[in-house]
Amino acid sequence: MAGSIFGSIFRVSTWGESHGRGVGVVIDGCPAGVELCEEDIQSYLDRRKPGQNKYATPRKEEDMVEILSGVFEGKTTGTPIAMIVYNRTQRSGDYREIAQFYRPGHADFTFDRKYGFRDYRGGGRSSGRETIARVAAGAVAAKVLQYLGVSVYAYTLSIGEIRCERGEIRLEECKENALYMPNKEKAKKAEEYLDSMMKEQNSVGGVIEGKVLGIPAGIGEPVFEKLDANLAKAIFSIGAVKGFEIGEGFSAAESIGSDNNDSFFYDEWGKIKKETNHAGGILGGISDGDEIIFRAGIKPTPSIGKRQHTVNKSGENIEVSIKGRHDPVIVPRAVVVVECMAAITILDMMLVGMTSTLEGIQRFYEKKLK
Amino acid sequence: MAGSIFGSIFRVSTWGESHGRGVGVVIDGCPAGVELCEEDIQSYLDRRKPGQNKYATPRKEEDMVEILSGVFEGKTTGTPIAMIVYNRTQRSGDYREIAQFYRPGHADFTFDRKYGFRDYRGGGRSSGRETIARVAAGAVAAKVLQYLGVSVYAYTLSIGEIRCERGEIRLEECKENALYMPNKEKAKKAEEYLDSMMKEQNSVGGVIEGKVLGIPAGIGEPVFEKLDANLAKAIFSIGAVKGFEIGEGFSAAESIGSDNNDSFFYDEWGKIKKETNHAGGILGGISDGDEIIFRAGIKPTPSIGKRQHTVNKSGENIEVSIKGRHDPVIVPRAVVVVECMAAITILDMMLVGMTSTLEGIQRFYEKKLK
Amino acid sequence: MAGSIFGSIFRVSTWGESHGRGVGVVIDGCPAGVELCEEDIQSYLDRRKPGQNKYATPRKEEDMVEILSGVFEGKTTGTPIAMIVYNRTQRSGDYREIAQFYRPGHADFTFDRKYGFRDYRGGGRSSGRETIARVAAGAVAAKVLQYLGVSVYAYTLSIGEIRCERGEIRLEECKENALYMPNKEKAKKAEEYLDSMMKEQNSVGGVIEGKVLGIPAGIGEPVFEKLDANLAKAIFSIGAVKGFEIGEGFSAAESIGSDNNDSFFYDEWGKIKKETNHAGGILGGISDGDEIIFRAGIKPTPSIGKRQHTVNKSGENIEVSIKGRHDPVIVPRAVVVVECMAAITILDMMLVGMTSTLEGIQRFYEKKLK
Amino acid sequence: MAGSIFGSIFRVSTWGESHGRGVGVVIDGCPAGVELCEEDIQSYLDRRKPGQNKYATPRKEEDMVEILSGVFEGKTTGTPIAMIVYNRTQRSGDYREIAQFYRPGHADFTFDRKYGFRDYRGGGRSSGRETIARVAAGAVAAKVLQYLGVSVYAYTLSIGEIRCERGEIRLEECKENALYMPNKEKAKKAEEYLDSMMKEQNSVGGVIEGKVLGIPAGIGEPVFEKLDANLAKAIFSIGAVKGFEIGEGFSAAESIGSDNNDSFFYDEWGKIKKETNHAGGILGGISDGDEIIFRAGIKPTPSIGKRQHTVNKSGENIEVSIKGRHDPVIVPRAVVVVECMAAITILDMMLVGMTSTLEGIQRFYEKKLK
């Protein structure tokens, strides 16, 4: 089925393999009138680019985006926005060998079982390069959200067991370290940990935390299209994500009602607020006007140099060591991908949310209210 | 938008409020030829019925299901299956008071913000009674899966901090305790904990673990329609769920590659197996033929007798105590809801998965393979 | 697959068979705040009721609708509206015989081929009673459209070869004749023709014309979700429809550009208008603000008393005469079904159309325009 | 909304404007294992290429397709197939003038009303060049259908009032004339008629007839997803189509039941056949195993040299003559577009139709039938 299309109204359709001609995306349903240029997209893509520090693959990839349609005289036209990032290197020679065996922790085996064969060059469609298309689409979503007063951001909350605790988060420190961690001391410890793992040709996982600011109350649809349910799907669709939580998340499961409930109160301007935000900004699947907070648990990069057991296609149990340089941790590069999937989801649900009341529809169509 | 419809091919459309005429579901896309009767559904509904033990609301609800269409001479016809459970009691008098304030932890506030007003009787559409429709649909999905050799089950993994550890799970013990916990000693401790919380008019959360057995490798679609992404959405769409994980889940984020990767090997019959199952049966969003394992973190019931701060509609900060008897924990009753949402998702993805290869389609249409 | 669900935002899910427990519909995505009661629906259902004149089946069917959810204190809540019409008579005895053969012109054969068996009682799901659910949903759509200043109506344009020509249409005459024809002289001729066909135990077809008034310009999405494409699907999904056209329709195919193009001009108030409306109110798939005009060609009722050749399940070629009293023409009763499917489509596209421009979205969310 | 995506399982997402960088398509949901190369697509694209005869625009457009993803070692991988056709010429100078007025019969006015502005270069997204993407996708669908024994073809049935009658259709003659008409005498007459219209700087319409051979019985879903309803939408989504009919179409509306019903009989091999095919191969929205026959009515090309009234953006009523050479008839070039949209629809419905029965699903998953 069409597994590469996401969204209800702001609809994103991605394509491309790691070692094919390129990767790309078509956004259908972006509203008309948004100022948009390639630089808006490129600045997001640059954040997921490999080779920026020693924890990321040093392969030379330029990943320059081209907008092919949907923008005229500097503005979106309301029709599909196609974007492409050509793959600069398509050397498939290096990958002949992995065609013969199944890498542990990768989708090689399951793709073969599903499709009968696979594009084995660098993971093909299951490669991390697929996220380029998500980031390009997310950059557009973020631009539209900006016009609506909504912003989405994320950071590395933990690497292995080194975690920034609640009081330790200082966003401005994210850009001062290679790990995009909001605390430089913790970042330093995490770097030491990573160095030790790299020596062992091993890899580590971590947790990304994301926030949405400025979203109005009332976004999200009851029952199946809850805002948190759609965020869960969006984030879980990113390769390597193994867990997702909103607000207190799994900690809420160990909590008691009187602690976990957020009390309402009227603030000094007569606006309804919550004393706490254990809910993470969503009640009954609908935004409550508070900051949305969520976390994604990311597994260690499966490609490691350390020797592992696996099988080849000749029916043999073998030992392999995955060659090439691979990120010992993908968490820092995945931060922008998480942001982008969240932005796409939030925008889509805000568009969906415009039809909830007759009064809103009448106002839109400038009909007298009856 | 249409928030009450779920699924791509096996499509479930639910309706109903806690204190309206009833709740119901229409399943569109159930294959023809499945033997189905009301008893198949009722046995699932009975598992979520309240009033079965002292931890569940003692309200008398019979919740008898009627099949209104889609079954002829004992078999599904392939056309929509409509099912209804009438609400026996529709006393709305008790609920007039809560119309005036916003219960902490509930969707009262967000529904008002979204729709301008709400059906305040017992939570209306955001009530737990909405899950009756999910369970009715899930019972049908489970029946179809049974014919395909697939089974889905779940249990209470933890209540508050009392958790069954990996070696302690004995499924047969689930039915021997009121909490549907797979370990009677832990169940006893959890009951003591619950009793103490009930005395305080408080409530607790917990974790539900689910498993899928017998699912073939190759189910799930790459990129956005990953099997785990769809499970995440399905489970997160259940009210009170605040976290979801697959396999090792958030623990994987603290792990290292060499530990977290599952090695492949050929078993004695030449079949490819994994030495471990940290992945939880899904690689790259596609089932690997192993058992699927997932967990849902459930928050404490928000309705508590203990006094809480909140606001009323007259602009006042007030204190409230939620009256009526409410479950001090919803985890045990939510187990069957989790099972049912998983069953619907798995079946839907198996139907979707029939079109992955030309060879499979040709075989289906009995065309000679070229 | 889910063939019984229609619409993108205003989503309609129907169920039920002619001789099962009843037929019904769930509308998911109806905006909150619409005043709605059963009488609003019933007045539409009464228009498709059989037995109102000698050209319609005299079976006693009451078709009383009940609203089961989604309305609270007289207004829609924004959550699913479930409606049911119970079948009063479920005598299946009369239909045992037709279980054994395939009625010409009916779906008996194709249902058997598709599903392996069928609910043979009165056509089951392929019966005309299925349209009750469409009409109930359409009545709600029409009510919402009324608040937006849009109205949809239809009438019998022709019965057999007796057709109301353009200058002969006088809407007020529709209700003065049993055929819902907008010209009493033509209606009289058509009645004489029908009488002669009834004597022969034969049936006739006809054409329904529909119009949409008050729809703003700009509704409809380019390329695949054109307003006319969606209307075509909606109307063609009604059983017995064999043709659909917009504006000049097939006549345009015999026309020349200078005749068929509609010239634009500024009217005395400076508004852009068209001199003619050959386009039928839609240009490039998008409404142009003019009246939308469309026609549906309806085949003769396939159930006729006259002897016909067919096959039975025992492998024999046989002759049959369809018993029971059947409408010699379904056109007059189908008028309201056509109206309702058009109303659902127009409303859905108007809701979809709210997200076309950034400016509109900003205005909706009351953000300052940048 | 996402108006540029079509299909349920075989899902086509198109993009591009007539004078932008290019046009393209992403097919998501094409099964794996289909042999596919650019030549398969190119041969279809060449059939819609302009400049092939004097009735088509002589602009030099090469329209060379490139496959960017989804094909590996000569076979489809099951992941998205992206295809692009770059626009060779992007001279927008010629189009500055039409930015200032609304061409009669075009979407200029409605795009402006919908989006606030438009890409006025050659019609932008509403240009006929958009159909390149449909044809590229349709070529893939036709290739898959070929493996399933199904073929789709179409031809010019009429130009203006010159129509090939039923007995006059000789397919082999289509390629012998510039109009793709299946009768050379009629083609000659039509050419004379076209020549006279060209002299007047006018244009004409026509009818395209399409057929589907080899489709098994049982394809199409009851109620809203009828096979004919989806074909109607598919064909009506092509610009300039104003009418659609199946089988006898509008003629059925003038017919009587005993003439219009198709009698069933057992043929000499014991197979159930129909004596006639007035239904056009579809009963109750489901294919009956017979040839599917449909027709599309196409309006005259709206771009004509002859002077027309219209309005400009400065508030003036003006006279215009559309410059440049435009096809005096688009029917012959639209034939392949009709074929392609039909192929996409038929394939999609065949994939959807694989899940209709439990028996079929069990057989697919090789489970023992119970």
Image (cartoon, coloured by chain):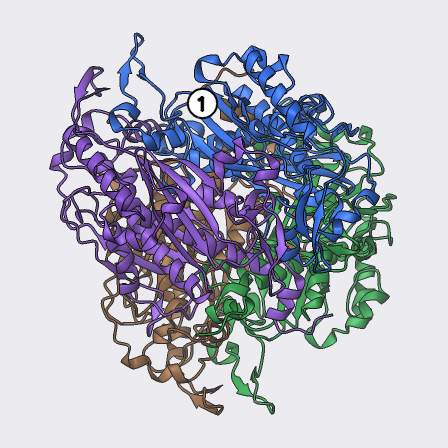
Chain colours: A blue, B purple, C brown, D green
Q: Quadrant of residue C193?
A: bottom left
Q: Quadrant of residue D223?
A: bottom left
Image point (48%, 92%), residue name: C316
Locate residue D240, reporting x and y percent: 66, 49
Question: Chain for mark 1?
Answer: A
Give the amino acid at mark 1. Answer: Ile
Element class at badge 1: loop
Image point (59%, 72%), residue name: D216
Locate residue A111, reporting x and y percent: 64, 52
Position of residue A273 in the picture relative to residue C314 (left or right): left
Q: Is residue D79 visible?
A: no
Q: Is residue B99 above or below residue A122?
A: above
Q: Looking at the image, how many numbered discs can be counted on the residues?
A: 1
Q: Nearer the viewer, residue B154 or C179?
A: B154
Instruction: Check the picture and name the quadrant holding the N terminus of chain D.
Output: top right
Position of residue A317 in the picture relative to residue D85 (left or right): left
Q: Nearer the viewer, residue D309 or D187?
A: D187
Image point (32%, 69%), residue name: C56
The residue carrying mark 1 is: A215
Instruction: Check the picture and name the quadrant holding the C terminus of chain D.
Output: bottom left
Q: Nearer the viewer, residue D23 or C232?
A: D23
Q: Is residue B301 above or below residue D200?
A: above
Q: Nearer the viewer, residue B143 or D117?
A: B143
Locate residue D306, reporting x and y percent: 76, 42
Locate residue A220, reporting x and y percent: 41, 33
Q: Is residue B37 visible?
A: yes
